[in-house]
Amino acid sequence: MSLPTLNERAQYLLKALVERYISEGVPVGSRTLSQATPFSL
């Protein structure tokens, strides 16, 4: 079973989410993520 490929938007959002989680050590909510990225959620 292969994993689906993420589009550019999904890759950007996932990267932002993981980086924020690693740097702060707390779960990242959709509001925080939407304020930190140029994409609408």
Image (spheres, grey):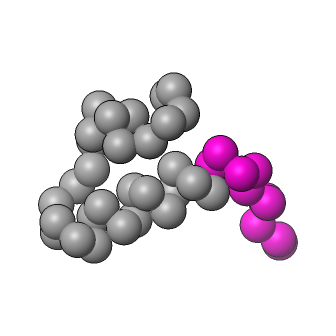
The residue range painted magenta reads: 1-10
Residue plotted at (49% across, 28% down): 41
Q: In the image, is 41 to the left or to the right of 19?
A: right
Q: Nearer the viewer, residue 23 or 1?
A: 23
34 left or right, relative to 13: left
For the question of whether residue 11 can be seen, the reply is: yes
Check residue 6 for magenta coloring: yes
Q: Is 8 above or below relative to 3?
A: above
Which percent across, then down, holds residue 38? 50, 36
Name the quadrant of the N terminus. bottom right
Q: Residue furthest top?
A: 40
- The residue lying furthest to the right in this view is 1
Main structural element of the magenta stretch: helix, strand or loop? loop
Residue at image x 79%, y 60%? 5
Q: Quadrant of residue 22?
A: bottom left
Does residue 25 show up magenta in the picture? Answer: no
Q: Identify which residue is drawn at 17% across, 69% down.
A: 25
Seen as rendered, the residue at the extreme front is 38
The percent position of residue 20, horizontal first and vertical second, equals 30, 61
